[in-house]
Every structure is written in structure tokens, then in C-alpha cells.
Image: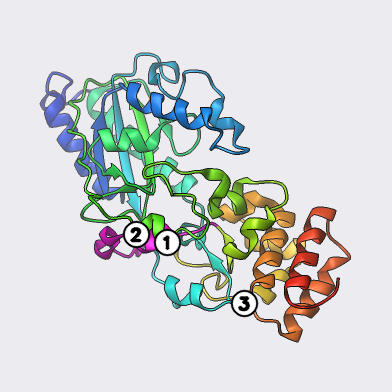
Amino acid sequence: MRQDPTLSLLEPTALKRQIRGWSEELGFTGLGVANTDLTLAGQRLGKWLGAGQHGDMSFMAAHGNKRTHPAQLLPGTMGIISVRMNYFPRTGLSAATALALPDTAYVARYALGRDYHRLMRRRLQQLADRIARVTGPFRYRAFVDSAPVMEKPLAQAAGLGWIGKHTNLVDRSCGSWFFLGELYTDLPLPADSPAENHCGTCTRCAAACPTGALDLAYQLDARRCISYLTIEHRGAIPVRFRTALGNRIFGCDDCQLVCPWNRFAPTCCNSVFIPRHRLDSTTLRELFLWTEENFLERTAGSPIRRIGYQRWLRNIAVALGNGSAVNASVAALVTRRAGVTAMVREHIDWALDRLGQSP
């Protein structure tokens, strides 16, 4: 492969500038370079794991030192290219309106359209291909939630934003509604300056959290987090948190919706993230009556698919219990009660009791 001498590895600054331009052409809305030092991030992770705040997410404690030592994932790693891609979708029904309608299902904004993993992995591969055309073959690995990678500390080190009090990455120009991806490389690219923290004295995210999962700034107790409870948690949702779920059936955006920096967040026009199957405005009853075949068909290529049909029903049953005590909701719950697992049936019974009906 022929090497362009104007962008050779002897001129890493010029190469980095060109890489940033290519990333914009590929639809990424930010790019930075981080070094491989994750010592402080590793210490914070260890403290969080030691407190058991990861709940059932045993994968967070697995893989030894791979999270904090990039060279264990890609030997010879010298520079880590971190990218972001905006996703906040244009919807017919705003997030605030959907949350205020108790009989309307609320799905986290990132999951209304198609799954982002494949799209970003493909774009990262295209970026690597463009780099190789001018540098010659180089070692790299692309990651989008696909390995033990500390994406937020790396993105902060790369200058793409700071880790806010709600533990999401925040940027002054585009808020926090974006996905992250990484390209581990053996290229000696100059690192960017880490982003500075601009949360200040603001505590809106903690005040908005329905379950108190953000009572300690910069520390998420996943065991109390609605996103964890509706997506990662496989068993019964603890009774003490069910009312707080409201109509949220997949994830939760409350901490981001109140963040002042998201006033500047642009909406995304990428067709991949446009809501599918009216998930931004569909009633809980309609979704609860999906058959398993409906669920598998309509969540194909969606982040929602990963929770499976039974957890889908579990989450909606709780939301129905928090909604209006109308005959249609009661009928939907009773109709589903006979053909589900014992775990889901327990949530249906809880919902019926909440609506003043005996199971």
C-alpha cells in the first residue's frame, strides 16, 4: 500500500488533522485522541465495584486489567481515537410530553430507532481504511460497547466532554445525547487536552432521578437506576422501585432531560435513529398486547431486542400498574396473565392490585 509522504507517521499532527476531517465526512460529530493512562479511572471503577453498585452486571468486574490497560486488548496501543455521534431524534411527541402521559409508553431516546452498534462499527472500520491508505497497514481495533473499554474516561481524556454528575459524558456544544466509539491504534498520534468539568454547583440531575440513584455526585448506584432495572436486571423489579418507574418501559432519560447543557443539544437527522413503530407515542396497552412474534419482528435491529419478550412484558406490566385504572388496562393485564412466566405474572398481579383489581 503506497504511503502519502505528506501524511506520513513522521508528521502525526497532520495525520490527526486529516483523520478528524474524515471522521466528519463519515458522520461522527466529534473526534479526539487519548493516551493509554487509565490509572485514576481504574481506581474509581474499583471503588464502585467494591461497593457493589454494579448490581448484577458481573461483566463489569470481569476481564482482569483489560479495561484499564488498553495494550491487553491491542498489543502496542499508543493512541486511542475516540469518536462521538449525536442521536437525539426528531419525534412527533416530545420526551417531556410522553413522560407526562401515564398511559403512553416511554422508551429511552437512544432506543427509539435502530441499534447504533453496527452503524458505528462500520463507520469506524471505514475510518481505519482511510487511515491505512495513507499510512500503510497499521494495527487497530474498533470498539462500540463490544469489549471491556472505559469509553467515558477515554472520551474525556480525548477532550470530547467531561463525565458529569449523572456519570454521562457532557459537552458544552452538544450536551450529552451522543454515542461513543473507539479505535485503538499503534499510531503515535498527539493526544488532546482532557475536557474540563463544567457541572459547577448544579444538582438538577440528582434531584430529577426518580429512584435516588444519583444521590452521590459522579457516582451512579446502578441497583437503583431505572435504566439498569428495565434493561440489565433479569429478575423481579424490587417492589420499592416499581411506582417510581412510572411509564418508563426501556431505560430512563430524566437526568439528561434536565441537564442545562442539553439546551444546546442538536437533534439528529440520521434516518437510522428515527423512531420506529411509533415507539415515541404508542400506548402501553398496545405494546403489552404484542405477541412474542410481534416483539421479535418489530424489535429486529433495535436495542430493545436484547431484553427479550418476558422482560418486555415485565416492564410494561409495571407501567400499566402506574397508569390509569381503565377497563382496557385491566383487561390487557388479565389477558396476558395466563401465558407468561411466574416472574412476569407476579408483576401483572402487582399491577392489578395497584389498579384496584384482584388478580
Q: State yes or no: discs 2 and 1 in contact (Cβ < 8 Å).
A: yes
The residue at the point 41 percent across, 22 percent down is 68
User: On the image, numbered disc 2 is attached to which residue?
Assistant: 204
Residue 208, labelled with which disc?
1
Residue 274: % across, % down? 45, 66
Q: Quadrant of residue 130?
A: top left
Q: Quadrant of residue 135?
A: top left
Task: Describe residue 301's horizontal placement relative to residue 321 as left or right.
Answer: left
Residue 308: % across, % down? 69, 52
Residue 109, labelled with which disc?
none
Measured Cα–Cα span from mark 3 to mark 2: 29 Å
Inspect the image, locate mark 2, and give the three-letter code of the amino acid beneath it.
Arg
Inspect the image, locate mark 1, and give the three-letter code of the amino acid beneath it.
Ala
Q: Residues within 10 Å of mark 2 (few under 14, many from 20)?
A: some
Instruction: Check disc 3 and report its element: helix, strand or loop.
Output: loop
User: On the image, numbered disc 3 is attached to which residue?
Assistant: 283
Task: Describe residue 200's horizontal placement relative to residue 355 as left or right.
Answer: left
Residue 246: % across, % down? 58, 68
Instruction: Check disc 1 and report its element: helix, strand or loop.
Output: helix
Viewer-nearest of discs 1 and 3: 1
Measured Cα–Cα span from mark 2 to mark 1: 6 Å
Inspect the image, locate mark 3, and give the three-letter code of the amino acid beneath it.
Thr
